[in-house]
Amino acid sequence: MPIKFIICDLGGVYFTDGTSIALEKIKKLVKADEKVIDELFRESPGKEGYLLRVGKLSNEEFWKIVSEKLSIGPDKISKIRKMWRSSYKPNKRMKELVKNLRKKYKVVAFSNTMKERMDYLDKKYDVLKDFDNFVFSFDHGMTKRDPVFFKKLLEIIKADVEDCLFIDDKEIYLETAKSLGMRTILFKDYENLVEELKNCGVITSFKR
C-alpha cells in the first residue's frame, strides 16, 4: 500500500538528541552518581524521567525530586532546566525536508516528551506549525514503548497502520512499530534518511 502518513520523532530526529547532550553537561555540573542522573532525566520505565514524560509527575514535583536526589539548590536547578531545554536544536535541513514531504504526505510529530519542553521549543522555533498533526506522551500517559500508544496515534490521525512510515533514532521504538506492521526507518543522519526515503518510494523534490 502507498504511504500516506510519515510519523516523525522529534528529539534525535527533527531536533538534536537534547537529553544526551544535556546529560554530558549536567554530569560535569553536579557531583552525583551517574546512574541516578540518568534515571532522573532519561526514559527508564517507572523512574522520574519516564513519569514526567507520561504526565504522572508535574514540573514542580519533578524538579523537587531532582533537587533532593542531587542535593542541589534553586540556582543549579534553574541552570539545569535551561541546559536541558536549550540542548534541543533543529537538525540541519530537517525543517526543509518536512516542508517538502508535506507537499505529498501528512507528516505527524510523535514524541516522548514533556509539556515544559514542547512549550519552550514551540515558542523558540514555532515547531508545531511544521507538522500536520502531533501526538505527545504527556497528553496520553504512554510512551512509544507501548503498542497501545501507536494504536492511539493511528486513531488520532485517522490512519491505517499500512498507510504509515515511522522515523525514529531509537531501535526500541521502531521494534514496537514493526510489531504492529508499520514500515520504519532508523534515523542516523539527514543524508541517510533521504536515501532511506527514496528506498521506500518517497520522492523528495529538493537538493541535498
Image (tube, rainbow, N blue to C red):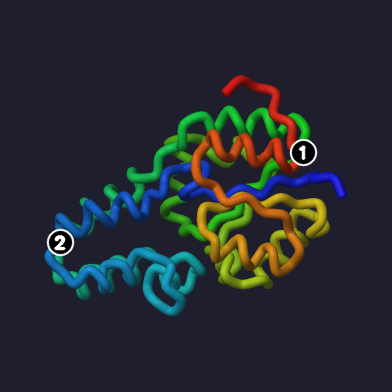
Task: Point out residue 149 in the picture as x, y percentages from the top left corner.
Answer: 65, 67
> Residue, x 61% and y 20% (percent of image)?
207
Q: How many marks?
A: 2
Task: Point out residue 11 in the picture as x, y percentages from the top left corner.
Answer: 47, 50
The tag on residue 147 is: none
- Which badge, 1 or 2, comes first in the chain's sequence? 2
Local SS, label 1: loop
- Amino acid identity at mark 1: Gly
Task: Point out residue 21 in the picture as x, y percentages from the top left corner.
Answer: 31, 50
Q: Is residue 70 above or below residue 77?
A: below
Q: Nearer the viewer, residue 3 or 114?
A: 3
Query: Badge 2 local density, few (<14 within 10 Å), some, or many (20+)?
Result: some
Q: Residue furthest right?
A: 1
| Tag nearer the camera, 1 or 2 | 1
Label 2 sits on residue: 30
Q: Is residue 186 left or right of residue 163?
A: left
> Residue, x 53% and y 63% (percent of image)?
138
Q: CA distance from mark 1 to mark 2?
A: 47 Å
Label 1 sits on residue: 201
Q: Is residue 196 above or below residue 99?
A: below
Q: Is residue 127 left or right of residue 1?
A: left
Q: Residue furthest bottom?
A: 46
> Residue, x 29% and y 52% (percent of image)?
22
Tell me which corner region of the image, top left, top right, bottom left or bottom right, holds residue 68: bottom left
Q: Is residue 89 left or right of residue 33?
A: right
Q: Is residue 33 above or below residue 132?
A: below
Q: Residue furthest top?
A: 207
Local SS, label 2: loop
Query: Which quadrant is the C terminus positioned in?
Result: top right
